[in-house]
Image (cartoon, rainbow, N blue to C red):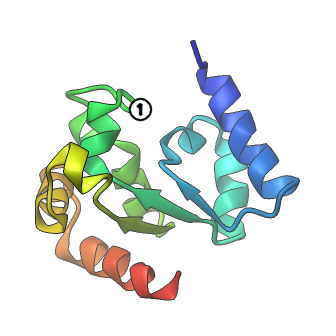
Amino acid sequence: MVTSTYRVNFFFQAVENLGAERIGHGYHVVDDEGIYASCLRRNIHFEACPRSSLQTGSVPQGIGQKHPIRRFAEDNANFSINRDGPAICMTTLKEEMDIARGWGLTEAHLTRAVGYLGAI
C-alpha cells in the first residue's frame, strides 16, 4: 500500500530534485503543510481530474467539500480542472466542472482554473 507519507515525499523529490513544475493528481500534497506551502510559493501547477480522483481511489468517495481540489481553489493554487482518460472515465470537461461545483468551487475558481490551462 502506498502511504500518504510516501506520496508527499514523492512530490518533494519531484519538485526539489527533478525541478518539476507541474504535478498530475497531486491531491496528497495537502497532507504536508510545509511541502504544500513550498509548492504554492513556487507556483507548482496541479493538474486535477475530479472524476478519476474518485474512480481511482486517490481521494475517498464522499469527501465532497473537503476534496483537495477545493483547497487548491481556496488557497489560490496554480491548478486546472481536466478530464482524465476520456475513453475510460467517460466524462467531459463540463461534467468535471460540474463535479467541482458540487464541491463548492465557484465560477471564479473555475474560470481561474481554466485560465491556467492556457498558461501550461
* Identity of the residue drawn at 32% across and 63% down: 82
Query: Which is nearer the eye, 69 or 50?
Result: 50
Judged left or right of residue 72, residue 92 is left
Where residue 23 appears, as percent x and y from the top left, is 58, 56
Residue at 54 percent across and 38 percent down: it is 28
* Residue 75 coordinates in the image, percent (x, y): 47, 62
Quarter occupied by residue 10: top right
User: Which of these two is toward me, 104 or 23?
Assistant: 23
* Above or below for 53 versus 117: above
Q: Where is residue 19 shown, x and y percent of the image?
A: 81, 64
The three-letter code of the residue at mark 1 reads: Ser
Please state if 99 lies on the left or on the right of 18 as rendered.
left
User: Which element type, helix, strand or loop, lies under badge 1?
Assistant: loop
Q: Name the residue under label 1.
A: 58
In the displayed structure, 18 sits above or below 1; it is below
Label tally: 1
Residue at the location (20% across, 28% down)? 62
Where's residue 57, x and y in %?
Answer: 35, 27
Horizontal side, residue 35 vs residue 16: left or right: left
Residue occupying image coordinates x 31% and y 52%:
85
Q: For the residue carrying disc 1, how many other residues have a C-alpha within 10 Å: few (<14), some (14-19), or many (20+)? A: few
